[in-house]
Amino acid sequence: MTPGKRYADMLKRFDRARFYSPIEALDLVVSLASAKFDETIEMAVRLGVDPRRADQIVRGSLALPAGTGRTKRVAVFAAGDAAAEAREAGADVVGADDLVARIEKEGFLEFDVAIATPDMMAQVGRLGRVLGPRGLMPNPKTGTVTTDVGRAVTEFRGGRVEYRTDRVGNVHVPIGKASFSRDQLTANFRSVVDELLRVKPAAAKGRYIRSITLSPSQGPGVHVDPLRARVTDEELAASA
């Protein structure tokens, strides 16, 4: 498919074969975000893992220091005091058996994140075929099965993101909006890199971070040098 004129013009503004430093790439990606809305800056990381092996699946969640720029709709499966805590924290939908039934019978899916207390997972498990394919199934590894529902609601509404390797070993994470400052985007970028290094599977061999690409919602990808992925404080100060 031939790219549109706007997209083709963006491709002329940088060297597609070059590997940029993280700060250079972030500045460039922001400059490419010319849509009529505040575009999301996406980060894609290719990891040196075999996601077909259970011991090499990279999965979890992290709270981005500058947030994502978007408030997520949160549904909570809880009862009693936990349900009250979730409502107080700002959950959009809270319920127990009634919420499970609403999803089963009415197909209700107007939420971006689902959180559950451990005692609700027996009922929530019935929704696996509905929530699983949409990435909405609560899971302890991503912090969405927890007894501390108040904190989980606050974090996921504000800036906690989930990540997981896809079938070829890529991890996709939104790291903010084009309207964010350089410092905010850099802080989020650093947080993602640090998190992925922290959860590196012991079974992973060879180079772990193989490639990093940054892109705006409606723009091309810019390659980041994976050998320079860890932004130092000195680099950030020098770029100010």
Image (cartoon, rainbow, N blue to C red):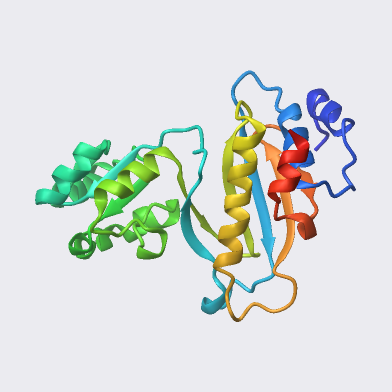
Residue at image position (16%, 46%) is 83
Picture quarter with the N terminus? top right
Q: Count every numbered label the image shows and give the total.
A: 0
Residue 4 position, x and y percent, is 80, 27
Left or right, 29 with reference to 14: left
**Residue occupying the far left of the picture:** 80
Extreme top residue here? 36
Expressed as whole percent of the image width and height from the top left, the position of residue 117 reads: 22, 58
Q: Which corner quadrant of the image does residue 197 belong to?
A: bottom right
Q: Is residue 77 visible?
A: yes
Residue in front for this viewpoint, 14 or 238? 238
**Going 20% across and 39% down the picture, which residue do you hit?**
87
For the point 90% across and 40% down, which residue is it?
15
Quadrant (top left/top right/bottom left/bottom right) for the C terminus: top right
Question: Which residue sits at x=32%, y=49%?
Answer: 152
Asked whether residue 166 is in view, the answer is no
Please state the horizontal and vertical placement of residue 208, each as a whole percent of the image.
70, 69
- As rendered, which of 204 and 124 lies closer to the eye? 204
State whether residue 104 is above or below residue 10: below
Examine the rendered structure and indicate whether residue 136 appears above or below residue 106: below
- Residue nearest the observer in this picture, 28 or 122: 28
Q: Is residue 114 above or below residue 59?
A: above
- Which residue is at the front of the view, 104 or 78? 78
Give the image location of residue 156, x and y in percent.
39, 44
Q: Is residue 194 above or below residue 83?
A: below
